[in-house]
Image (cartoon, rainbow, N blue to C red):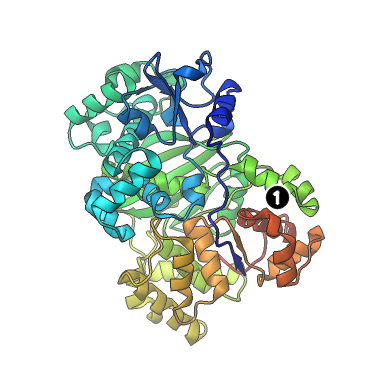
Amino acid sequence: MAIGGHIGVMTAPTDFASRYAAVSGRDARFDGQFVTAVRSTGIYCRPSCPARTPKPGNCTFFVTSAAAHAAGYRACRRCLPEATPGSPAWNLRQDVAARAMRLISTGLVDREGVPGLAARLGYSSRQLGRILVDEFGAGPLALARAQRAQTARHLLVSTLMPTTDVAHAAGFASVRQFNDTCKEIYGATPTQLRSHARRSERTAEPGALTVRLRAREPFDGDGVLTWLRQRAIDGVERVSAHGYSRSLRLARGPATVDLRPDGAYVAVTARLTDLADLPELLARVRRLMDLDADPVAIDEALAALPAMRACVAAVPGIRIPGAVDGGEMLVRAILGQQVSVAAARIAVQRLVDAVGDRVPEALAVDGVTRLFPTSATVADAGAGVLSGPRARQAALVGACAALADGTVRLDPGVAVADAASALESLRGIGPWTAGYVTLRALGATDVLLTGDVAVRTGARALGLPDAPRDLVAATASAAPWRSYLMMHLWRAASPTSGGHHADL
């Protein structure tokens, strides 16, 4: 197994001339990776904004919109820079600043404050603030405020929710704070922002809210659905020809969500115990569908390998199917060790049927009636309902106990290398399981499971060497994107089923 140890290369330009060239060319590839603040107008835009290109002397570039806010600029109403996909750098990088950004996107600051964020990362609040200001031009409170503003705008333009509910769902402490933030960042009141939205964007479904999330193109959303369909657990998940529904646990209670890919967008329909959990749900959806990936950079790197050119051309924008919960993915991976997908699915289904909680009636949707059991539940009751080798049962119970007591963490604030090391320290967890879990649960971009039978089968089918060391050497130039290469190898091993590797 190979797990890339470096943080990869930033695909966004970092010097003034290159950024200005991207803005002049209205290059949408860099939307979400930096913003352009224009001194003559007092607004900031995404690189692809259709407005007239400002003069170089009027431009200042910021890595985050929060930094532009702090400098006194407001968001452009024409290009809506807050509506872009997130920067792929936050998923690729493993340093403390990027991990902080991933946690902030889940609404953690609204739930636990800056001290809670700092504690998760092992820093003091003051140290973390300095790091984020140096890196992004804004501290954790400003970054969280920008996140709230983005969520609020999504809800204002795409739902009919009352503005008081929008304020709560976005994480604002009060309606007054919500109104003041909208005026400062967007130069408009919430009512004015809503009036500018196209009616076709709005959806209304009793008891649910729907927003549309943007993905970078090309986007192989159908490929993600195919993967999820083959591994769906009855009661927890349901995959139709056009969408995917499932239950999940959030900070304030359970929820259900329905996802429907549509071109460069994914329509997300959610039913929540508490509307304030919406930012966390959207962050999990983005990871599940890998919406913030940089497909152009990934495809270019993979296509540079002669053996991969045809695959990349046939399936542009391939994605890593993620996970909505690290504990769930660990259970699936352990029960999938050295067995077929079908056998692993039966084992997981038995566990869910025995100890999975019921979804509250108000949140249930067609075919989604159960919640995946928590790590604590599996640690306490799993051994009594599992079959198969005792060593595997013990590994599962022990791993879930480690997750439940915090010995092992699989949340967005954990570095991939640290998570893999912690997992491999557990009895019964080897490199394959650790690598697979970091791939799915943490979105690790440079995992290559060279011991996986289907990976080696796919490599042979494409003309790559199948011996582990030779495969690592032959694909070294594809780093830090070998997780995406592996998705192509799995597909090549079994084109009609997405691969027969033993996992869920």
Residue 450 appears in the picture as rendered? yes
Q: Residue visible at 54% across and 34% down?
A: 15
Question: In the visual, does 405 lie left or right of 246?
Answer: left
Q: Residue visible at 54% across and 60% down?
A: 439
Q: Residues within 10 Å of mark 1 (few under 14, many from 20)?
A: many
Residue farthest to the front, as pictured: 57
Rendered view: 140 above or below 74: below
Q: Quadrant of the N terminus?
A: bottom right
Question: In the visual, does 390 lie left or right of 117?
Answer: right
Residue 349 appears in the picture as rendered? no
Q: Give the x, y percent position of residue 458.
A: 74, 62
Question: In the visual, does 219 lie left or right of 184?
Answer: right
Q: Which residue is mark 1?
A: 302
Query: Which element type, helix, strand or loop, lies under badge 1?
Result: helix
Rendered view: 411 above or below 279: below
Rendered view: 337 above or below 46: below
Residue farthest to the bottom, as pictured: 390
Q: Give the x, y percent position of residue 474.
A: 75, 62
Looking at this view, is 1 or 398 the one in front?
1
> In the rendered structure, which amino acid carries the disc numbered 1?
Leu
Question: In the visual, does 57 lie left or right of 502?
Answer: left
Q: Give the x, y percent position of residue 394.
A: 43, 83
Looking at this view, is 188 or 472 the one in front?
472
Q: Residue visible at 39% across and 40% down?
A: 136
Which image quarter: residue 196? Answer: top left
